[in-house]
């Protein structure tokens, strides 16, 4: 996609489509009268009759009457100028992206000045346009033999502004990196598990590492056995597919200190094992690697934007299958940390693979840990499909993350983790921990179990079982993988990097 910035001059537009932000009183937008005289004075009438809507999120598509290249104008209703927020604008640009892809538009001109208010400066508008449109353009790759040949992509984007801000293009490019990295994560989540095996996920990660010059390490079954990663090995035991522990290191400086570890659950398929899921619960379990996808997406952003912060990604990947070899309830296993675990439910496998991944991250020098996982159905019961559940052991660290998530518009809600919760996780007659203390407080026990392996390292647990995939289309994308937490993780790193520079 080629991007250019140009002054507001409607007669010079080379694109086929012009996107115009239309507040309730559009006459207060600078250059509006020029636009009306360019487009035609009927516009004033249509705004009054509502044929061109200023209602927030309403798109009105109208043709142009001139003979130039410009064929159509998309009027984007923005509502009251005072109340439009950045989140609103991101979503609105998502719907614009969807419209552009649906109408097979290849060249678009966006009148950026028409989208600004007191809250949203021109560089914000540029960023949000890029992020929202990129996400809105996303299509779920399919395996239909008849498709793909007619796919159309946006080739040229022109940003119209009279602002002398030189950074507009740079903001757009960063927004695009964020949006496209979300889309990469979405594709990983949408891939079926017979295609995206642990080995394939590692291949993807290796390529990413090569592109951005990350240090890369990949542990297979033999190395896991050597190191004593009994937890991930137990989950993998019933599978014919090899497990993978994927490690990537982004070195911002020569010292490997102050390292943020991003740890992802990469269960490529979760049958539940012997504690098997009911048939309706199985459908969709190809997406049980959403945490891994979030980490990979965030690493792509980090590779592109090069923040001043050391980051390590650790992804634990395997499927959870049934066979004569599979692990069983009542088994007792020994994790990499040395802690023993009584298995009460083989469907509580995510916390097991994360236990070894978190321990490995610590051994490799992580000073902060964020784990991301489609961990429990409990989080969906508690918070619904649009909120990510969180736990933490560190207020300051969580505060920074929460601010990042507010900036990205990804809703995160923290649940408590108390001493009595920890007691229940540690309750076992035969081992140090049990992997399933029961259904009440379900999400807390899942994340809390991972916390047992973190000790005092500042830690945030993110349960994205609800948010990692959408059951229907939404403003920023289609049904399926959402790429949840990709942007918030990357923004967290960006914020920590800025905090360091300010010190
Ligand atoms: N992968 C599931 C969680 C999940 C459920 C993700 C629904 C997405 C949608 C996880 O491994 C699991 O099975 N959790 C169990 C835990 C229970 C056995 C303690 C659950 O949530 O029921
Ligand atoms: Zn499970
Ligand atoms: Zn699972």
Image (cartoon, rainbow, N blue to C red):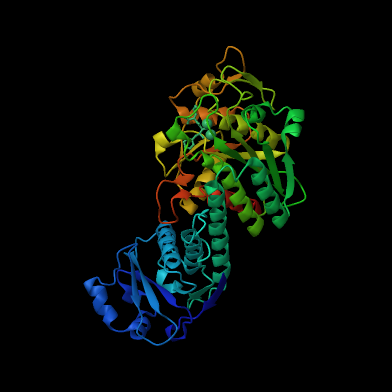
Residue 216 against residue 360 in the figure, above or below: below
**Residue 310 showing in the rendered view:** no
Give the residue at x 42% y 75%. 18
From the viewer's perspective, is 380 left or right of 400?
A: left
Q: Position of residue 267 (x, y in %)?
A: 58, 37
Residue 388 against residue 278 in the figure, above or below: below
Q: Position of residue 212 (x, y in %)?
A: 70, 56
Q: Depth check: give the residue in front, 89 or 480.
A: 480
**Residue 319 showing in the rendered view:** yes
Residue 144 against residue 33 in the figure, above or below: above
From the viewer's perspective, is 390 left or right of 79?
A: right
From the viewer's perspective, is 75 left or right of 123?
A: left
Give the residue at x 42% y 58%. 91
Q: Position of residue 96 (x, y in %)?
A: 42, 65
Q: Position of residue 478 (x, y in %)?
A: 44, 54
What is the quadrant of the N terminus in the image?
bottom right
Q: Residue furthest front?
A: 145
Q: Residue furthest bottom?
A: 67
Give the residue at x 71% y 47%. 249
How many badges with numbers are in the image? 0
Q: Residue furthest top?
A: 429
Residue 75 placement: quadrant? bottom left
């Amino acid at each position: 996609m080629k991007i250019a910035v140009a002054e507001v001059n409607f007669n010079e537009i080379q694109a086929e489509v012009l996107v115009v932000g239309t507040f309730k009183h559009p006459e207060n937008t600078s250059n509006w009268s020029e636009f009306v005289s360019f487009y035609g004075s009927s516009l004033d009438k249509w705004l009054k009759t509502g044929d061109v809507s200023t209602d927030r999120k309403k798109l009105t598509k109208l043709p142009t009457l001139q003979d130039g290249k410009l064929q159509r104008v998309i009027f984007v209703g923005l509502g009251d100028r005072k109340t439009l927020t950045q989140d609103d604008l991101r979503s609105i640009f998502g719907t614009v992206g969807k419209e552009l892809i649906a109408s097979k538009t290849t060249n678009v001109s966006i009148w950026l000045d028409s989208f600004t208010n007191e809250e949203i400066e021109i560089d914000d508008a540029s960023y949000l346009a890029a992020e929202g449109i990129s996400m809105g353009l996303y299509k779920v790759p399919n395996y239909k033999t008849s498709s793909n040949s007619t796919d159309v992509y946006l080739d040229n984007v022109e940003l119209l502004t009279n602002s002398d801000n030189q950074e507009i293009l740079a903001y757009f490019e960063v927004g695009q990196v964020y949006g496209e990295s979300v889309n990469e994560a979405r594709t990983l989540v949408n891939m079926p598990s017979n295609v995206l095996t642990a080995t394939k996920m590692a291949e993807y990660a290796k390529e990413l590492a090569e592109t951005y010059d990350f240090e890369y390490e990949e542990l297979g079954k033999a190395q896991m056995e050597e190191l004593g990663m009994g937890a991930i090995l137990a989950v993998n035991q019933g599978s014919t597919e090899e497990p993978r522990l994927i490690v990537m290191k982004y070195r911002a400086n020569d010292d490997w200190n102050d390292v943020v570890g991003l740890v992802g659950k990469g269960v490529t398929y979760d049958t539940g094992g012997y504690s098997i899921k009911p048939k309706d619960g199985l459908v969709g379990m190809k997406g049980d690697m959403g945490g891994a996808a979030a980490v990979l997406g965030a690493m792509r952003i980090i590779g592109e934007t090069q923040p001043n912060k050391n980051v390590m990604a650790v992804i634990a990947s395997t499927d959870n299958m049934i066979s004569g070899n599979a692990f069983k309830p009542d088994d007792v296993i020994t994790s990499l940390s040395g802690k023993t675990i009584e298995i009460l439910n083989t469907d509580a496998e995510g916390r097991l693979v994360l236990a070894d991944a978190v321990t490995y991250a610590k051994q490799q020098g992580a000073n902060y840990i964020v784990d991301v996982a489609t961990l429990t159905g409990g989080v969906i019961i508690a918070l619904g499909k649009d909120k990510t559940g969180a736990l933490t052991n560190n207020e300051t660290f969580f505060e920074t993350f929460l601010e990042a998530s507010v900036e990205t518009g990804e809703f995160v809600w923290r649940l408590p983790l108390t001493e009595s919760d920890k007691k229940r996780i540690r309750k076992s007659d035969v081992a140090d921990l049990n992997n399933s203390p029961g259904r009440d407080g379900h999400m807390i026990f899942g994340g809390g179990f991972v916390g047992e392996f973190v000790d005092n390292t500042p830690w945030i647990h993110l349960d994205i079982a609800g948010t990692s995939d959408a059951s229907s289309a939404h403003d920023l994308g289609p049904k399926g993988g959402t790429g949840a937490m990709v942007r918030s993780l990357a923004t967290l790193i960006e914020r920590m990097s800025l905090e360091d520079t300010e010190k």
